[in-house]
Amino acid sequence: MTYTSSWRSPSNIALIKYWGKHSLQLPRNPSLSFTLSACHTQMKLEVTPEASTPGLVVMYDGTPRPPFELKIKTFFSLVSDRFPWLAQASIVIDSVNTFPHGAGIASSASAMSALALCLTDIHDQLNGQDHGQDADWWCRASEVARLGSGSACRSVYPVAALWGASSGIADSSDEYAIPWGNEIAPVYHDFQDTILIVSTKEKAVSSTAGHKLMEGLAYADTRYAEAKNNLLKLCDIMRRPDALDQFITIVESEALQLHALMMSGDTPFILMEPGTISLIKEIWHYRKETGIPVCFTLDAGPNVHLLYPKEYTATILEWVKSTLTTYCAEGRYIKDHVGNGPEKV
Ligand code: DP6
């Protein structure tokens, strides 16, 4: 008998950055993210347990992609105690991303969260417990996603997610993310994220290698303390509808700190491109001139995430087209926004 599960799972963008990990993908500091919508992975998992010829086939849009198999096998070995049936199963994974390959958008959060959701779902089917998803179910899926890629654990919740044990935040944990949408003001529930594609090149440094560079960095402990502090401050700020200025200060500082950390190791690396810097300056100038609360964040790459309240969408997109696309590779950008989380398809 073959069991099937299909999920669509979104990417997320961190406001407080996870950068530095230990043990089995446990974070050195808590992080907070918006769940996105347009950028997502759709995945189908087919599992035949106790197959006569166990094995794994990984496909992208129907075409076999053997290079991904090693990463998935490593992940399966990390979750084998939860899903013991994996060892003797014949498994086919087929997925497709909505965001184009080579757009410089990391797919690990959406892909690994989609895989975690499919696995958790199939596990229920195998155990005759396919009764839908309660809070505990999402928590388990988040933990499985974390083992695939740290940031993926935040993608399983609508609107926003918080990952990492934080003093004073009930139920927060290093093992899994918790939903955070109900803790933030309505203005953030439909926040826009226009992703300005500065470069379409593959990432020069993988996140895993990047996290490693935090080990032994002179500023590491200061950074972890700062991130913890920023997280608590941002949680307070985002509860209020009228504190966008303070939101902007912390979010931009987190993005710049992430890149400053990368530049300060013994083997420094610079992931920003000239276009990244130009965009940051344009954003600062425009915000000062117009008073519109638009800001940026960055992940571990050169692309700029332009964040702003929905009410300014038309005005901002005009400015993007007239000015900001000058700095984008082939004028490319992706219109995304805070979304409703994964969906079973
Ligand atoms: C800069 O989750 O990609 O995007 O756990 O090694 O898979 P691994 O790393 P990953 O790191 C994400 C780093 C970041 C910040 C963030 O998303 O919080």
Image (tube, helix red, strand yellow):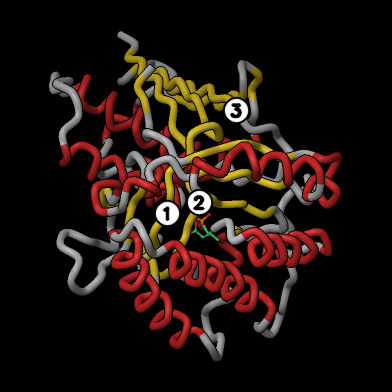
Which element is circle 3 on?
loop
Tell me the residue that label 3 is attached to. Answer: 98
Q: Most extreme residue toward the front, as rendered?
A: 290
**What residue sits right under mark 1 in the picture?**
33
Task: Look at mark 2 in the image and give the residue it sits on.
Answer: 13
Query: Whole-Å distance between the Cαs marked 3 and 1?
Result: 20 Å
Q: Residues within 10 Å of mark 3 (few under 14, many from 20)?
A: few
Q: Residue furthest bottom?
A: 218
Residue at 38% from the left image edge and 51% from the top image edge: 146
* Residue type beneath disc 2: Ile
Q: Is residue 153 visible?
A: no
Q: Is mark 3 within 8 Å of ligand 1?
A: no
**Figure check: 262 above or below 171:** below
Cβ of disc 1 within 8 Å of ligand 1?
yes
> Disc 3 or 1, which lies upstream in sequence?
1
Assess disc 1: are there few (<14), some (14-19) or many (≥20) residues with their C-alpha within 10 Å of its C-alpha. Answer: many
Q: Amino acid at mark 3?
A: Thr
In front: 82, or 252?
Answer: 252
Q: Which quarter shows the C terminus?
A: top left
* Residue 166 percent across, percent down from the top left: 25, 70
Res 194 quadrant in image: top right
Q: Secondary structure at mark 2?
A: strand
Q: Residue at x 20, y 37 (%)?
A: 137
Q: Position of residue 125 (x, y in %)?
A: 22, 20
Q: Is mark 2 within 8 Å of ligand 1?
A: yes
Amino acid type, residue under disc 1 in the picture: Ser
- Residue 145 percent location from the top left of the image: 38, 45
**Image marks 1 and 2: residues in contact by CB distance under 8 Å:** yes
CB under 8 Å between discs 3 and 1: no
